[in-house]
Amino acid sequence: MKKILLISPLPPPIGGIASWTVNILNYFNEYSNPEYKLLHLNSSMKFRSITSVSIFSRILYGILNFIIFFVKFLFNILKNPNICHITSSASLGLCKDLVFVLICKIFGIRTVIHYRFGRIPDLEKQKNWEWKLLRTINRVANHVIVLDARSLSTLMRYGDNISLIGNPISPELMIFKDKYTKEENDNLLFVGHVTRKKGIFELFNALEAIKPNCETYIVGPFEEGVRSELEQIYNSKDKVTFHGALTKDQVYKMMIESKMLILPSYTEGFPNVIIEGMALGCAIIATSVGAIPEMLGENRGLVIPPKDIDSLTKSVEVLLHNDAMRNSLSVNAEKYALENYSMESIVKKLEKIWL
């Protein structure tokens, strides 16, 4: 029986890759394959808040985390796994990823590097240090997984050991769907880390321009300084509620009851919040980054350029006043998600690589 070592983060802190890990491990609590055993090594970031953008803190805590994690990694390598499946969020983490794939190569362990971000085409254009590190890792790794078609097309120009695998719908969401039916309330919803890169400032500028006669719920971890800045843009405390981090079921309930879900991010890979919103029948507005254009194409959502306040404002206004369009986007998104993002289909794609 093969041993597959999955190296990926678990909450806390909450994040896209950590949520993916939880969904995969929960599925494997019930599922098994006689050909292999799945092991897991938690690579989550400690000490630093995930909403912090300080370069100094990223470097300092990155070094501390690397030292701690390196010891754990070596301990697991001595268990002789056949394959190491490493999730990567790129940036400074690529330095760590390169060290690990090189060590695996020395020990004769096959590696799968799983890029969990959608900036690969942009990195190719920039040809910066990040791109050079990524290309080096790809040459050493046995297989590379990406989240979107543009990244796949970019890397296929440099090698053929590339696969595209999206994120799955969580089993918990499917259980939730069996218990609740969609009932639209008069509110807008943002779900994600409340940081500039998630497009939250563009959203508040759009809200200030529209001044919608409904509430907006902001769900996700935030820092008080950011909240204060946002309230200076759209100062309508009776219309905006910052809920902070909520349980999955609480988020799902908000999704299934909201008029629309808005995610104006600057960068994404294959965002779980979009999959969840689609599966729950949300009308979605999101930006043309990562896999989002593929996910929301063909009348499954409204896709706008990132950092474009005017496009965001117009899209929100359109959906606020067009019930038929909201319903059409909702129905199309839900049908597509349930047909293409099931956990079973995603695991089969992973097994094809592992085995």
Image: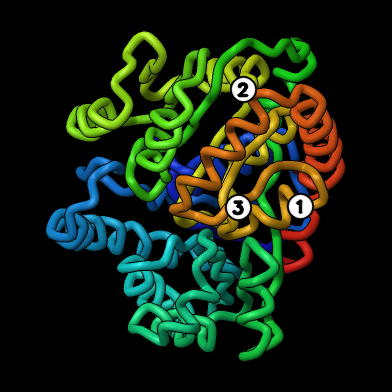
Residue 270: give its label: 3
Residue at image point 33% right, 42% down: 195
Residue 227 screen position, x and y as percent: 25, 28
Specify whether residue 25 is in view: no
**First in sequence: mark 1 or mark 3?**
3
Question: Looking at the picture, which amino acid does disc 2 mark?
Answer: Met
Question: Looking at the picture, which amino acid does disc 1 mark?
Answer: Gly
The reply to whether the C-beta atoms of the residues labelled 3 and 2 are less than 8 Å apart is no
Residue identifier under label 2 = 255
Q: Is residue 159 left or right of residue 236?
A: right
Label 2 neighbourhood size at 10 Å, few (<14), some (14-19), many (20+)? Answer: many
Residue 297: give its label: 1
Q: Secondary structure at mark 3?
A: loop
Query: Which of 265 and 112 lies nearest the eye of the viewer?
Result: 265
**Quarter of image, res 274:** top right
Label 1 neighbourhood size at 10 Å, few (<14), some (14-19), many (20+)? Answer: few
Q: Is residue 343 left or right of residue 199?
A: right
Q: Secondary structure at mark 1?
A: loop
Foreground label between 1 and 3 = 1
**Quarter of image, res 25:** top right
**Quarter of image, res 343:** top right
